Amino acid sequence: LVKAQSALKNQLHIQLNHHYPSYKKFFSELDGKTALAFWQQYPSSSCLEGTNIKQLTAFLLDVSNNTCSVKKASDILKLVKEDGQTMKEYQETRDFLVRSIVRDIEFKKKEMKYIERELKQLVKLLDYQLETMPGIELVTASALIAEIGDVRRFPNANKLARFAGIAPVYFGSGGKGKTHKSKQGNRALHALFYNLAVQQVQVAKRSKMPRNPVFHAYYQKKLKEGKTKGQALVCIMRRLVNIVYGMMKYKTAYELPVVEEKEEV
């Protein structure tokens, strides 16, 4: 559903680019409630012909629960005027296509909300607390549970790591050889741990604070040791396997460790 929703949004971007060259300045979110209502009512600038500020303001106030202002209506009409004539051949068909895409997006949103409610109940029944860890929301928690299944079937975290294709594989003989990244295992689970690892080392744009100070420090340490970014992320993935394994086996919550600052000498 998420992939389908993303594909629909891309289609909407393409169509709106033809109808409203400045559409990205209309609303903060392309698929927000107010934006979708606007695209549905006015799929192209030709549908706005004859609409004045008062009429557009009344429409926007209604669909946005009174959060939009006269300025929003004025800004949109000004941008449309600056864009100039954008009407194309078969405009009615193009307008129909935009409205159809909007309906599909709205339907997918409702489906996703329903699925999230069902998943929330399921996760609650299983009594896992995976969502207490930064980077794990409901969908990710549900995906981890679905791919891992009954965690008790893995005697230890090493077995789970191998199942996810995260444990390194040794190639060699006679005491000589090298370890290489495994390309086997559950690729879906591998991708989940990879995405989770990336989120652990992310830094907030505004505050510049790491999302998970412990993993961010560990990541920097591995880079200083000479590992590539990819290798450092694999190290984090392996640690995450240990954490997720323990959280699922003992049904515990994640507690963010405190990073001890080194004293200056």
Image (tube, helix red, strand yellow):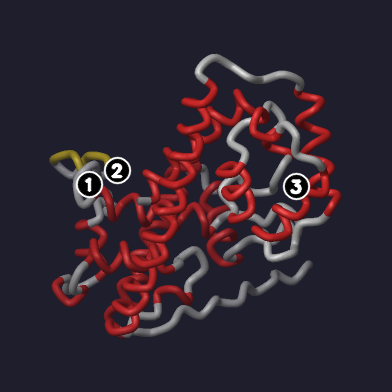
Q: Position of residue 195 (x, y in %)?
A: 43, 52
Camera-nearest residue between 253 and 26: 26
Camera-nearest residue between 218 and 78: 78
The tag on residue 235 is: none
Camera-nearest residue between 212 and 70: 70
Q: Are marks 1 and 2 in contact (CB under 8 Å)?
A: yes
Q: Are marks 3 and 1 in contact (CB under 8 Å)?
A: no
Q: Quadrant of residue 15?
A: top right
- Could you say whether the residue bearing mark 3 is in a helix, strand or loop? helix
Left or right, 61 with respect to 142, comes to right
Q: Quadrant of residue 49?
A: top right
In the rendered view, tell whether residue 174 sits above or below residue 168. Answer: above
- Amino acid type, label 2: Lys
In the rendered view, tell whether residue 89 sits above or below residue 108. Answer: above
- The residue at which mark 1 appears reads as 169
Identify the residue at horizontal 47%, vertical 25% (top origin). Answer: 93
- Could you say whether the residue bearing mark 2 is in a helix, strand or loop? loop
Quarter occupied by the C terminus: bottom right
The tag on residue 56 is: 3
Identify the residue at horizontal 31%, vertical 62% (top origin). Answer: 143
Q: Label 2: how many residues lie within 10 Å, few (<14), some (14-19) or many (20+)?
A: few
Q: For the residues marked 3 and 1, what is the alpha-carbon distance in whole angstroms?
A: 63 Å
Identify the residue at horizontal 14%, vertical 73% (top origin). Answer: 153
